[in-house]
Image (spheres, coloured by chain):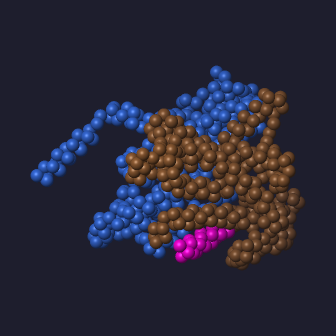
Chain colours: A brown, B blue
């Protein structure tokens, strides 16, 4: 087992390195740089010397290979450096926004799991009945509906309901408070987080419910389920203890992978609810040619993704020892 | 004896295949009602895109300041937007953008993934290992950064949206195709092809690729829906198709939120069009999978 874990950790390195190379050169392929943008933005006419000075300050005057070496060294020592645009430490800039995005992702995961597993199970047990068709239509609609449109509909719903109820349209708060100790802050954060979590959670639950259904269908055909029924076990235990436990593996995988995707994929939802999360920072840093910030953000998201996959793989190997030998 | 048995079976097969076309459609609708519903939505969407010039009541780009943000009425069935453009006309023409981006990126991404996946499985060993790592990188790389970079490098517009959407499809298709191709590689006829001295490209393209068509077609139908969704998301972020081209995602971006209380139809109908379109392709794709995947059919 340890050998397998070690092998999987070693396999993570090329993926991270590849992503580092990809983002480094992709960013530098974009025409223009941060200095041109900054000096042009200041409104005054600028000359070559001020441009050179600025480039020296942010460190993009050095040869490509030196810059890449610095970037890799920073990653290896967990020092992400400073943002080229704001000149503040990247870890500080990411911190609060990462928390906001993480909170939405966690809430969406909870919403999705609570909806998906019962729905998927019922759909599989009642295969080819109207319940099954209704659940399948619900889940396929969830995959089809863009989460940003659901977000817009939620906002519309809130606006119309509050307008009708109180006469004044109300909008959910947009400022996240990292301090969760006072009731005021908790109320504010929940009022802010619940809507984007619902908007992304629907799609997420649809994906997980479909996986639960197909995994359950497969398990329900196994011999040991027939045996369990034949020996007179009540249906509740057949489903709960024998089937669901064995069907959960692919469902957990899907939930894990969707969670990892969500960390980098909240951009559109954040835009709808006007939130200042990781997604917004992504868009800003690319449009500002902020190389160090974009590189750090990509590496954070890729690391979350790779790590989630690693956990899922180890989980699989632990449950099914045959995988380790492949 | 054995020969005659085979002949009888062959006869049965020809009889079985000779089903009149008119009975196939109702038969399919009875056996796969959801798939048939999906197919109908897809067909309507395609017809809408082809005959947009005929069925559309108005010019989708014509501004009319006398008709700004009008509620749905007999003159404008789905209302008008903040420039007085007819929402229905823009949705009908938007089907063109959605289908064009959807089909092209699904076909291009799927085909590249197909060849790469089969090639990787065929060569195996170190090439396969390296190739898998490269696919891992593209799978893990955040899609939105890729799209942002593509748009920043090449500029906005339908072609560049297609590039941005195609890139993430390649590794996804290559993975699925590779796992099917790995099984095919072990079948003796590939060995026979090698013994005949055929070139690698001939074995990959003529002997292995046709046998992974089932997973490939399943992926393609799923990709079209995904691509439509991605195009809408990118256009909504302002990274995709640009005004005044009618596109569903773009319609949600341009003022749909500002006019949320006064003109909610601007936000509701384009989103409904995206959802219905993707819904249709997904239902259809599910039915295609059930028909093409013998393992699932046996269940």
* Res B100 visible: no
User: How many numbered marks does the figure carry?
Assistant: 0
Give percent across and percent down for residue A20.
Answer: 65, 69
Give percent across and percent down for residue B198.
Answer: 32, 69
Residue name at image x 83 percent, y 70 percent:
A54
What is the chief secondary structure element of the magenta stretch? helix
Above or below residue A43? Residue A216 is above
Residue at the front extreme?
A: A232
Classify residue A153 as left or right of residue A92.
left
Residue at the top extreme?
A: B74
Residue name at image x 75 percent, y 64 percent:
A293
* Frontmost residue, B70 versus A222: A222
* Res A246 visible: yes
Classify residue A207 as left or right of residue B299.
right
**Residue A26 among magenta residues:** yes
**Residue A307 among magenta residues:** no
The magenta segment is A1-27
Give percent across and percent down for residue A150.
Answer: 66, 41
Residue at the right extreme?
A: A44
Give percent across and percent down for residue A70.
Answer: 73, 76
Q: Quadrant of residue B140?
A: bottom right
Residue name at image x 37 percent, y 69 percent:
B200
Above or below residue A55? Residue B43 is above
Above or below residue A191? Residue B188 is below
* Frontmost residue, B91 versus B159: B91
Above or below residue A11? Residue B117 is above
Q: Quadrant of residue A273?
A: top right
Residue name at image x 53 percent, y 45 percent:
A120
């Amino acid at each position: 087992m340890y050998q397998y874990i070690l092998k999987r950790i070693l396999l993570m390195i090329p993926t991270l390195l590849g992503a580092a190379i990809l983002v480094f050169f992709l960013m530098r392929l974009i025409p223009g740089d941060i200095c041109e943008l900054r000096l042009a933005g200041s409104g005054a006419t600028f000359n070559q010397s001020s441009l050179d000075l600025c480039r020296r300050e942010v460190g993009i005057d050095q040869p490509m290979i030196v810059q890449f070496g610095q970037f890799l060294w920073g990653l290896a020592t967990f020092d992400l450096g400073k943002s080229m645009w704001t000149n503040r430490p990247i870890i500080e800039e990411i911190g609060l926004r990462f928390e906001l995005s993480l909170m939405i992702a966690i809430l969406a995961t909870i919403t999705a799991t609570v909806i998906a597993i019962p729905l998927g199970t019922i759909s599989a047990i009642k295969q080819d009945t109207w319940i099954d068709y209704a659940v399948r239509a619900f889940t396929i609609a969830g995959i089809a509906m863009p989460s940003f449109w659901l977000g817009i509909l939620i906002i519309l719903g809130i606006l119309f309901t509050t307008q009708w109820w109180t006469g004044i349209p109300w909008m959910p708060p947009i400022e996240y408070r990292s301090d969760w100790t006072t009731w005021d802050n908790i109320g504010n954060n929940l009022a802010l987080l619940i809507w984007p979590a619902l908007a992304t959670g629907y799609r997420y639950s649809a994906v997980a419910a479909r996986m639960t259904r197909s995994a359950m269908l497969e398990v329900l055909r196994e011999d040991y389920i027939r045996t369990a029924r034949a020996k007179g076990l009540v249906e509740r235990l057949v489903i709960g203890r024998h089937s669901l436990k064995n069907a959960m593996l692919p469902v957990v995988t899907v939930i894990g992978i969707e969670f990892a995707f969500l960390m980098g994929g909240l951009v559109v939802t954040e835009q709808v609810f006007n939130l200042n999360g990781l997604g917004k920072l992504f868009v800003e840093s690319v449009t500002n040619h902020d190389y160090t910030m974009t590189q750090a953000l990509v590496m954070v998201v890729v690391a979350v993704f790779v790590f989630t996959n690693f956990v899922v793989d180890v989980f699989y190997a632990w449950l099914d020892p045959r995988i380790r030998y492949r | 004896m054995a020969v005659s048995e085979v002949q009888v079976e062959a006869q049965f097969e020809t009889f079985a295949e000779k089903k009149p076309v008119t009975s196939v459609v109702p038969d399919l609708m009875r056996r796969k009602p959801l798939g048939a519903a999906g197919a109908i939505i897809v067909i309507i969407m395609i017809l809408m895109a082809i005959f947009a010039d005929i069925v559309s009541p108005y010019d989708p780009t014509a501004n009319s300041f006398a008709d700004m943000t009008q509620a749905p009425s007999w003159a404008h069935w789905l209302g008008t937007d903040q420039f007085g453009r007819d929402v229905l006309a823009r949705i009908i023409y938007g089907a063109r953008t959605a289908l064009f981006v959807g089909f092209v990126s699904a076909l291009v991404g799927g085909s590249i993934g197909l060849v790469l996946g089969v090639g990787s499985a065929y060569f195996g060993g170190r090439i396969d290992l390296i190739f898998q790592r490269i696919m891992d990188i593209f799978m893990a790389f955040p899609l939105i950064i890729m799209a942002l970079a593509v748009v920043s490098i090449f500029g906005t517009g339908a072609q560049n949206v297609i590039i941005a959407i195609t890139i993430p499809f390649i590794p996804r298709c290559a993975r699925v195709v590779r796992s099917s191709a790995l099984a095919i590689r072990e079948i003796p006829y590939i060995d026979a092809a090698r013994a005949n001295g055929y070139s690698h490209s001939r074995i990959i393209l003529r002997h292995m690729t046709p046998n992974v068509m089932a997973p490939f077609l399943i992926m393609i139908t799923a990709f079209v829906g995904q691509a439509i969704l991605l195009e809408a998301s990118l256009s909504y972020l302002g990274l995709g198709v640009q005004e005044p081209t009618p596109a569903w995602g773009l319609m949600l971006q341009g003022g749909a939120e500002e006019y949320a209380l006064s003109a909610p139809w601007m936000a509701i109908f384009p989103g409904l069009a995206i959802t219905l379109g993707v819904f249709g392709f997904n239902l259809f794709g599910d039915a295609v999978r059930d028909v093409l995947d013998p393992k699932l059919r046996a269940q």
